[in-house]
Image (spheres, rainbow, N blue to C red):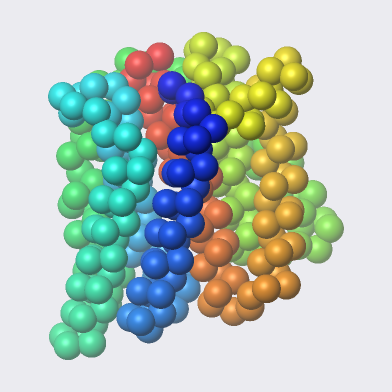
Amino acid sequence: MTAGYTATEAVVYSLLLGAGVLALRQVIAGLALRMSGRFFAATLPLVLLGALTQTLSDSTMLGFSLNAPVIFVTTAAAALLLLASGAAAERLAGLRYEWVSGGAGAVMLAYPALRLFRELRYPEAGVEVGVLFLISTLTVLILLLAAGYTHPWGLLAVAAHMLDASSTVVGIERYGYVEELPLEGMVMSLAGTAYVIFPMKLIALAVAFWVVSRACSGDDRRFWYFVFFVLGFAPGVRNTATMMTLG
């Protein structure tokens, strides 16, 4: 939601992301980790770490700039290392892996979180995002539940993308930011409003869920829902934190 990507950069970053996701799935399978609430607890601090580190980079608080792929690769490598360490600790010492991996991630998260908290200048931006997020998420989840869709990981992914969409709308409509992704930016320009991101997100998720539901089951399906969650939650947190610090 800061400086936009070129079409070439978007394609290259998407390919890197795809390769990283496939590698992550193989490592998780090799560690015999199930996609469960325990896995979610083990990885959430690192998802937040990547998002807030990108905010620090955007706001020049790091003293140097890091682009999104560098942060993604670094955070993914840290996640794999911590998951492997947690799995080893559980196997050898009986410690729950989510406490080992998630605890280490929380320690790493402390610096960017505290640094950004000290630099908050526009808390009202967070309130605006929060209100729009609650309205959009409750509306969509009620409609999905009424239609009989109850997969918890899928609902979590939808909520994450409502956060991303809400932060995008507030950033563009209220604070003068621009859409990073070329396709979404083009559609917003044609529509004349950033609010079009909501139906775009829902259509993309519907297609992705349909493909996953027919191609995968069990842990594989939950893994892809987790990926969809991260792809919405991380940029939503980054956008919101950036607006709350820079306006």
What residue appears at the point 67 percent right and 41 percent down from the top-left corner?
201
Q: Check the image and report above or below for 186 versus 76.
A: above
What residue appears at the point 24 percent right and 58 percent down from the top-left corner?
78
Asked which quadrant contains residue 187, the reply is top right
Q: Check the image and report above or below for 69 versus 85.
A: above
Residue 30 visible in the picture? yes
Please provide percent x and percent y for residue 245.
Answer: 33, 20
Asked which quadrant contains residue 194, the reply is top right
Please provide percent x and percent y for residue 56.
Answer: 27, 30
Q: Nearer the viewer, residue 207 or 140?
A: 207
The reply, left or right, for residue 91 in relation to residue 226 is left
Residue 168 visible in the picture? no
Please provide percent x and percent y for residue 119.
Answer: 25, 21
Q: Looking at this rendering, what residue extends furthest in the right direction?
A: 147
The reply, left or right, for residue 209 in relation to residue 44 is right
The reply, left or right, for residue 239 in relation to residue 68 is right
What residue appears at the point 33 percent right and 80 percent down from the top-left corner?
31
The reply, left or right, for residue 240 in relation to residue 150 is left
What residue appears at the point 29 percent right and 43 percent down from the top-left corner?
70
Please provide percent x and percent y for residue 247.
Answer: 40, 14
